[in-house]
Amino acid sequence: MNVSVCTISFRHMLLSFADIAQFVHEQRFQAIELWGVHAKSLSQGGAAVIEHCRSLLKLYHIEISMISDYIDVSPHADMKLSILKCDELIALAHQFGTNKIRTFAGKTPSQSVNKQEREMIVSHLRVIGERCEAAGIMLLIETHPNTIADNTASTLLLMKEVSHDAVKVNLDFLHLWEAGDDPLAGYEQLHKWVENFHLKNIASLENCTVFDSNNVYAPSGSRSGIVTLSDGQVDYISIIRAIDKSGKNASLEWFGDDPLRYLAQDRQWMQHIV
């Protein structure tokens, strides 16, 4: 199993790509999961910046595991704009040498969408999946609240509904636990579609609201309850041992303060576990 650092962890810090690459190398990570905002910013720097990033990846023997962003596939999405966004992310994926793009399955919980709305989301994902497949890219749907991939059963149904070879799952264990599911049981049901894992932990179920987008992106937002993998409610000892031989990539997400310190701590703990 390869282990990545998610650059979204550094969303409120002034770190260069070189700083991040050096940190990843020193802490014995194998890859970087590049947030779409960061990928776009680097790309806008031109060919010289992209070549510099590639040279750093080669120097440190690391790779870009995935571009993580958001393509609107909600029932009333303007699909012309969604396809343009998809094409932009495909171009970024090619520039950075990865074959995976992460997105969400709409903006509404599975229990709140009607049959027609769900069918539209499925149709939109299939369109985007076709676009990705033609470019040699996998489209990963994250298990996440306020989407129709918000629990194991709905995500499993979604994969069967979309039924496309390029559409896979980015399994976030905490969010399955947050939905009331057994995370490892969820993995067993979804494993044939899973291509990436997101790992993070929380002190209590009541604290999970800290991961809401509006809070996460706010520099002064609450970070209450965000803890290391070893200290939270989700049993990552069992999870890491179960996925260690998967051959997939696991990305560490840290939304709290002092990300360099805690990502390094989590990485060292993972190495001890396996």
Image: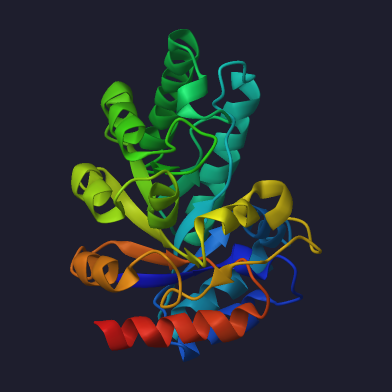
Question: To which quarter of the image does residue 10 belong?
Answer: bottom right
Rendered location of residue 185, percent (x, y): 22, 50
Can residue 59 be seen from the camera position used here?
no
Rendered location of residue 16, percent (x, y): 69, 77
Q: Is residue 110 above or below residue 54?
A: above
Farthest top residue? 116
Residue 44 shown left or right of residue 155 in the figure: right
Task: Identify the residue shown where x is 51% and y is 62%.
Answer: 204
Q: How is the image coloured?
A: rainbow
Question: To which quarter of the image does residue 216 belong?
Answer: bottom right
Q: Quadrant of the C terminus?
A: bottom left
Residue 35 shown left or right of residue 236 in the figure: right
Camera-nearest residue between 43 and 208: 208
Camera-nearest residue between 49 and 132: 132
Task: Identify the residue shown where x is 64% and y is 48%.
Answer: 212
Q: Quadrant of the N terminus?
A: bottom left
Q: Is residue 243 above or below residue 265?
A: above
Q: How many marks?
A: 0
Can residue 133 be seen from the camera position used here?
yes
Q: Is residue 19 above or below residue 78?
A: below
Rendered location of residue 42, percent (x, y): 68, 62
Residue 142 shown left or right of residue 246 in the figure: right
Task: Identify the residue shown where x is 26% and y is 43%.
Answer: 193
Residue 219 shown left or right of residue 5 in the figure: right
Rendered location of residue 260, percent (x, y): 60, 83
Task: Identify the residue shown where x is 48% and y is 52%.
Answer: 94
